[in-house]
Image (cartoon, grey):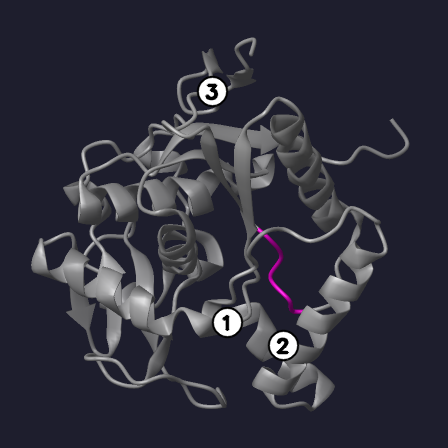
């Protein structure tokens, strides 16, 4: 088999894909947050990574493709509230719509499609490891990742600290030790109708920790390819790297592979 080379976002170089001893290649691609029907941009990574898996199988490799569904998120609470629906019911409906819409592409399904709601024990365990190692801290029912405790932070996106705005997933500013820190767990707030028990009280996970836990559950802590849209490089994938490497001491993926954006009208 000829070598397969991929443009790696992390190193900025074209790198050889290195399968396991039995030719296995684990691929994790970030799927949609189901706060509404998916759009054409959500379909692009589904198509790209499904076809990538097919290509690897054509080359004689044993490829496992995992594409998650984020069904716990601030945007889902807002959308469900606006629709006058319970958030869990709304997320379940939008997940079913996503599956129906991607089925219509005629490419089949990924090998695994984990839900954030089905990964809560693994998420809690990963957060506990980060607290025990000093990379995370509790704050009034929330848990935050100490960004400056991880020396490699910024290596994927190549941003300096002044450009690191964590956005909507940052959490409550008044509870953070540092503006760069981001939420791993968010305590339940008024008007939020779903929550899970944790050592820090009822609440729900932050967006970034969900994917770190789901990818590890399906593929282990170190697998071949982590993918998704280029818009996820920062902060989502940057934060995934920090969480997993801080907790496990191993690289999250060998290669980071990102698809570009859909372009319309030039």
Range of the magenta residues?
Answer: 31-35
Judging by the rendered image, the residue that carries numbered circle 1 is 72
Residue 37 appears in the rendering: no
Q: At numbered mark 2, what does the secondary structure look like: helix, strand or loop?
A: helix
Q: Residue at x 35, y 81 (%)?
A: 203
Residue occupying the point 28% across, 52% down? 179
- Number of residues whose C-alpha sits closer than 10 Å to that of mark 2, classed few (under 14), some (14–19) or many (20 or more): many
Residue extending farthest top: 2
Residue carrying label 2: 91
Q: Give the Cα distance between marks 1 and 2.
A: 8 Å
Provide residue 122's location: percent of width, then percent of height. Answer: 31, 66
Give the labeled residue for mark 3: 17
Of badges 3 and 1, nearer the viewer stands 3
Q: Residue at x 61, y 90 (%)?
A: 86
User: Do labels 1 and 2 touch, CB within 8 Å?
Assistant: yes
The stretch drawn in magenta includes residue 32: yes
Q: The residue tagged with tag 3: helix, strand or loop?
A: loop
Q: Residue at x 45, y 72 (%)?
A: 118
Q: Nearer the viewer, residue 210 or 239?
A: 210
Q: Which mark is residue 50?
A: none
């Amino acid at each position: 088999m000829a070598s397969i080379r991929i443009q790696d976002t992390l190193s900025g170089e074209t790198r050889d894909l290195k399968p396991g001893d039995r030719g296995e290649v684990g691929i994790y691609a970030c799927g949609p947050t189901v706060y509404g029907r998916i759009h054409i941009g959500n379909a692009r990574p589904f198509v790209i990574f499904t076809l990538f898996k097919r290509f690897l199988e054509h080359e004689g490799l044993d490829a496992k493709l995992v594409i998650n569904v984020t069904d716990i998120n601030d945007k889902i609470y807002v959308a469900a509230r606006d629709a006058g629906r319970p958030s869990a019911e709304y997320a379940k409906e939008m997940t079913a719509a996503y599956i129906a819409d991607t089925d219509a592409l005629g490419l089949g399904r990924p090998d695994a499609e984990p839900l954030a709601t089905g990964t809560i024990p693994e998420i809690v365990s990963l957060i506990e490891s980060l607290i025990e190692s000093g990379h995370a801290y509790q704050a009034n029912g929330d848990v935050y990742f100490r960004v400056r405790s991880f020396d490699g932070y910024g290596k994927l996106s190549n941003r300096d600290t002044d450009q690191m705005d964590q956005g909507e997933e940052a959490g409550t500013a008044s509870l953070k030790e540092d503006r760069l820190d981001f939420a791993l767990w968010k305590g339940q707030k008024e008007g939020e109708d779903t929550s899970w028990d944790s050592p820090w009280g009822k609440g729900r996970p932050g967006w970034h920790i969900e994917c770190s836990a789901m990818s590890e559950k399906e593929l282990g802590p170190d697998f071949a390819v982590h993918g998704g849209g280029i818009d996820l490089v920062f902060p989502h994938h940057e934060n995934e790297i920090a969480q997993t490497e801080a907790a496990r001491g191993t690289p999250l993926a060998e290669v980071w592979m990102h698809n570009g954006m859909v372009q319309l009208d030039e």
